[in-house]
């Protein structure tokens, strides 16, 4: 029994290392991972036909998409173009705006956005699958990012971890601020976010066309 107990922390450490390694791999491919989900949303027939339920799902989906993108825009205004990098290059540690409330507002916005697209496609069961798939993907990526940031930022990042939750916001910590220290202009923000905005517009247009054809 003592030998088995002693091996348990080592096994847990190996499991954590595997998640971190997977997270690094997923980080560099994080834009391509949702592609199969997008294809399913475009190809699967809607479960809800015409009527009040269909309208309700569409409206809920559009509101979720708008909310998810609004959260992303708020975050990008604070963090800037570094959010687009596929490397492990680090910018300054951002702890203002949505980053004062949760550590991963961009990923939270992505999940809300994709759930909204699934609802707009009138596939509520796919909204659950989307949330689960992206939740698992981002969990691994975040573990990798946290390991990297802690190694490079040290005490500064550990203090940030201690006061700001990963996903669910709580009361703003004393001394924290929602205002950006050096705000990016909205023009810079929209330019940095242009590919996501174009993708949203294209996705909604294709879903509208699909719903119009299928009914």
Image: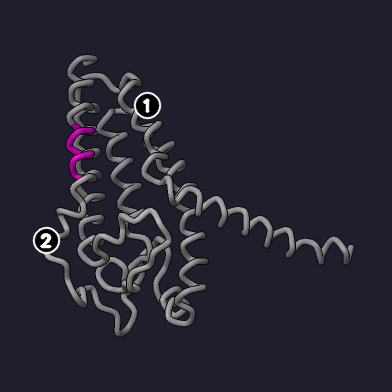
In front of the other: 138 or 126: 138
Q: What element carries label 1?
A: helix
**Residue 187 spot, x, y in % from top left:** 10, 58
Q: Look at the numbered discs 1 and 2 and tell me whether their residues touch, using CB distance below 8 Å.
A: no
Please give the residue where the numbered disc 1 appears in the rendered image: 40
Q: Residue at x 62, y 53 (%)?
A: 18
Q: Does the magenta stretch include residue 84?
A: no
Question: In the rendered image of this protein, does residue 126 appear above or below residue 74?
Answer: above
Q: Residue at x 37, y 34 (%)?
A: 35
**Residue 180 spot, x, y in % from top left:** 21, 73
Q: What element carries label 2?
A: helix
Question: In the rendered image of this protein, does residue 145 appear above or below residue 163?
Answer: above
Q: Does the magenta stretch include residue 198?
A: yes
Q: Name the dominant secondary structure of the magenta segment.
A: helix
Q: Classify the position of the N terminus by image quarter.
A: bottom right
Q: Farthest residue in the bottom direction? A: 175
- How far separated are the C-alphas under marks 1 and 2? 33 Å
Check disc 1: other Cα within 10 Å, few if <14, some if 14-19, many if 20+: some
Ranked by sequence position, the earlier of labels 1 and 2 is 1
**Residue 88 spot, x, y in % from top left:** 43, 61
Start-end of magenta stretch: 197-204
**Residue 74 spot, x, y in % from top left:** 21, 61
Q: Quadrant of residue 167?
A: bottom left
Please give the residue where the numbered disc 2 appears in the rendered image: 186
Question: In the rendered image of this protein, does residue 33 appear above or below residue 153?
Answer: above
Q: Which residue is drawn at 25% across and 19% down?
A: 49
């Amino acid at each position: 029994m003592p030998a088995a107990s002693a091996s348990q922390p080592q096994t847990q450490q190996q499991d954590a290392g595997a998640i971190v390694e997977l997270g690094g791999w997923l980080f560099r491919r994080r834009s391509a991972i949702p592609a199969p989900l997008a294809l399913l949303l475009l190809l699967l027939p809607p479960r809800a036909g015409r009527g009040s339920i269909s309208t309700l799902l569409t409206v809920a989906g559009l509101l979720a998409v708008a909310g998810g993108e609004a959260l992303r825009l708020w975050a990008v205004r604070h963090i800037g173009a570094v959010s687009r990098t596929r490397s492990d290059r680090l910018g300054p540690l951002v702890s203002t705006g949505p980053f004062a409330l949760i550590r991963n507002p961009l990923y939270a916005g992505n999940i809300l956005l994709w759930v909204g697209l699934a609802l707009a496609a009138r596939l509520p069961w796919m909204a659950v699958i989307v949330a689960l798939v992206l939740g698992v993907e981002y969990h691994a990526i975040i573990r990798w990012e946290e390991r990297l940031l802690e190694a490079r930022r040290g005490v500064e990042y550990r203090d940030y971890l201690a006061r700001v939750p990963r996903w669910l916001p709580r009361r703003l910590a004393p001394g924290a601020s929602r205002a950006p220290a050096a705000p990016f202009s909205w023009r810079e923000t929209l330019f940095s976010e242009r590919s996501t905005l174009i993708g949203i517009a294209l996705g909604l247009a294709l879903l509208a066309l699909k719903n119009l054809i299928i009914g």
